[in-house]
Amino acid sequence: MGRRVVIIGIATHWGAQLARRLERDPGIDYIAGIDSSAPPADLERTDFIEADIRSPLLSRLLPGTEADTIVHCGILWYAEAGKPERVLHDVNVIGTLQLLAACERTKTLERLVVRGSAAIYGCEGATPYFFTERMARTLPLRTRFQRDISELEAYIENFARRHSGVVCCTLRYQPEIGPDLDTPLVRYLQLPVVPTQLGWDPRLQLLHADDATGALEAATRSPVRGAVNVAPSGSISLSHILRLMRRPALPIPHPLFGPALERLGRQIGAGPLYGDGVRLLRFGRGVDNTRLTEEIGFAPRFDAEAAVRDFATMSRGRRIAPSIHPGDLVGRVVGAAR
Amino acid sequence: MSAHAQTESQATAESVADFLRRVRTGIEDGLDPVSAANRAADELPQRLGRAVELLSRRARGDYYEDEWGFDEEFAEAVHPLFEFLYDVWWRVEAEGVRNVPAHGRALLVSNHAGALFPFDASMILMSIMKQHPLPRWARFLVLDWAFVLPFISAFMRRVGGVPASKHNAARLLEQDELVMVFPEGAKGTGKQFTERYRLQRFGRGGFVEVALRTGSPIVPVAVVGSEEIYPKLADARPVARAIGAPFVPVTPTFPWLGPLGLIPLPSKWRIEFCDPIDLSGYGPDAAEDRRLLFDVSEQVRETVQSKLYENLVKRRAAFVSP
């Protein structure tokens, strides 16, 4: 008998991507998706169940699906249309609690995979450059999002302790990039002139969108107990990213950066970066992906630099005017001189 | 700066001036600025052409930085400045550089001084780069506080600095890197001038733990001369508390002369690399043994202290020695 998978948050980009991949697998008997809004139309054999993750209705719906695998893609990083910032805590923490309550009633459950965030480690100036899974909560929880993630991971750990028969796997994702992702960080990197924090050059790991989906799929197929970092190998600094993206940087003194970005964001549609972003763009963060590659058995295809290079080539096609970046200008002058 | 480097920078300056002159004649000939620049670029001498190419390659992001943010090209670019400090300003003499392994992991443990900017890491690195038969880059663990400062944190990272953390040190050693640590930390840099060359407590022996766990040899290093570059006469404690710094030194020149006070005094330096201490016989489990940690830590500390006294005698006068 094949597997029965339920994806929470099927209308999100990652939930839908995972469903698309799982639909192609004949070894999976049944796929269902739960969300408060409809999933993209191209899903073929995924049952859509309309329910809000925050409602107790979940506890009555979930056991009926007889799912053995539940994938939670409903954790939100950023405010979206219809889900402003103050709702995020409810969706992330209360939603996860409701889901866990529903999981308790689902007797067929064998695996629970949660798409969480590496924001739990926080962003500080002086830290280990590669956090391993055991280093969570060693630094102060500074932003709302970080506290939310820490809280919901604690609930999941608690659930895992009481249900030793269920394999609970929390994936700690670094921020993803991809030309068709609609996140503030992606929009930020695509600004014509990118504001940065004067004197700061954060070390980042941006995960290629294909690898993000691939890791989610691999973890759904063969989850391991506990937390797993999902990140590309290596790291890359923001200044290097902007050069590869051919985007001139506009350094702003860092106390003004948050407000400036928010104002600029509202005008050109970049949107405010929810809590974590400003600190991430000051201090950066790196995590160790050994557990992902060795225990889950998924090696990201793009390392930190290759992911940015690919993102840069994919989004360069959208440019309408020729680049005025100094790197290109000098190249053109030297080229013309030859 | 060496004579060679000087002539080279002069030559570069001349060719820039030459380029601008050619652009101007081009414009006077009735060309528009871009084609004038093109024509001038056509006539550029080789060396400037290469420099322009390098700069444009870097502006396009076609360079490599490793997973620690170390950028070798950048480190090479700032090399001449440190070379000047090494050769001319501080007349550094290095001894026993061959005790640094030419390949594989090793931990260099040194005393720490220089209240405003501790230059000892860069000078140890320079002596390896200049005098070792097989030069190699070394990474250094930097006081946490430096990594919450703008500019300094970004600069440190590019030239091989890493925030002082056991996890970072262990990971670097596992990658067979050469790592410098200064176990005295801020206690070493923040001590009064009257206490110069008196080693402070060596932390909690964390560096020995890392060396044991990764099976790395320890090379003790004694640096003489770093204490005199910014003689710390007093501590502006309220200021330090206000900005969250471990200390704010008052030296004969800082803050009285403003930015000029940041220029280090030209003392005479000596660096001695001692015989490596091989710990591989203990095995990684010995890292749990507190007593062993303190014993080895104390052994390293005594070696560095006695070498400091030896080199102080060899150096004679602090400033006037050639």
Image: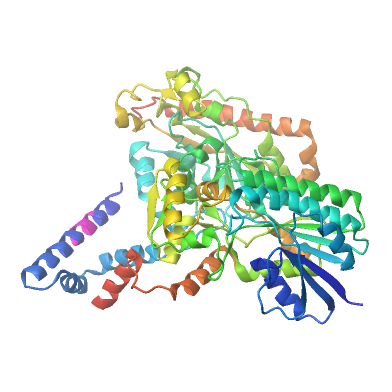
Q: Nearer the viewer, residue B277 or A112?
A: A112
Q: Nearer the viewer, residue A28 or B249?
A: A28
Q: Nearer the viewer, residue B248 or B251?
A: B248
Residue A35, percent from left and from top: 72, 64
Q: Is residue B315 visible?
A: yes
Residue placed at 70% from the left, 49% from the top? A90
Residue A326, percent from left and from top: 32, 64
Q: Nearer the viewer, residue A227 or A234?
A: A227
Rendered view: B249 above or below A271: above
Residue placed at 39% from the left, 45% from the top? B82
Residue placed at 54% from the left, 44% from the top? B140
Residue B242, percent from left and from top: 47, 25
Q: Is residue B151 visible?
A: no
Direction from residue A327 to residue B43 in the image, left or right: left
Magenta stretch: dominant secondary structure: helix
Quarter of the picture holding the C terminus of chain A: bottom left
Quarter of the picture holding the N terminus of chain A: bottom right
Residue placed at 21% from the left, 56% from the top? B13
- The magenta region covers B10-15
Q: What is the number of callouts on the image? A: 0
Rendered view: A289 above or below B202: below
Among the 4 quarters of the image, the one containing residue A226:
bottom right
Q: Coloring scheme of the render?
A: rainbow
The answer to whether residue B248 is magenta is: no
